[in-house]
Amino acid sequence: MNLRSSFLTFLLPVIALTFAPAAFDYDTAKGDYRSSLLRLHNQERKKRNKPRFRRHAALQRAASKYARVMKQNNHFSHTGPDGSTAHERIRAAGFRGNATGENIAQGQRSAKEVFRAWMRSPGHRRNIRRGFFDRIGFGKSGTYWVTNFGG
């Protein structure tokens, strides 16, 4: 490698980072928002001596699909544009546990930001802390966020 190519190898990532938008969420861009959210949820659960959440494929499918539906329809509600409930959407995705729950949010740009918003909301915080929920799935589309809970 010559001096010029070494310099370009160093300079190009620096230029890219310099011009990246301030609100750019690196964990979401890398697809790690799910890992970040799982870690944040489990940190909160640990403080309360609650069982750790484990990801569940059906909850993941339901959350991802509903995040896309909300974005595509410019719709923000626990009731779907088709009249569906969170419980119905989670069941339709294949979850067969006894209990279901859903947290939604819109507008946040990072996993930390959306988690903080949920923790400031009594109903959303209650879902995160409920001991009978032990499985979880996350979805995101644009700035629409969904967490589905199961137990």
Image (cartoon, rainbow, N blue to C red):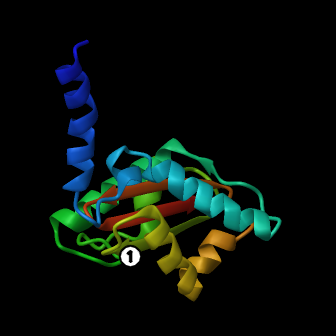
Identify the secondary structure beneath mark 1: loop
Q: Which residue was labeled with disc 1?
A: 78
Q: Look at the picture and state if 58 lies above or below 3.
A: below
Residue 133 or residue 109, whichever sits in front: 109
Residue 80 figure quarter = bottom left
| Quadrant of image for the N terminus | top left
Where residue 83 appears, x then y in whole percent?
Answer: 29, 74
Q: Look at the picture and state if 127 lies above or below 122.
A: above
Query: Residue drawn 69% across and 72% down?
Result: 129
- Crowding at dot 1, Cα within 10 Å, few <14 / some 14-19 / many 20+, comes out as some
Residue 56 as seen in the image, left or right of residue 66: right
Where residue 71 appears, x then y in whole percent?
Answer: 21, 65
Any part of residue 103 in sight: no
Residue 70 or residue 41, whichever sits in front: 41
Outermost residue toward the top in this view: 1
| Quadrant of image for the C terminus | bottom right
Query: Residue drawn 27% across and 50% down?
Result: 17
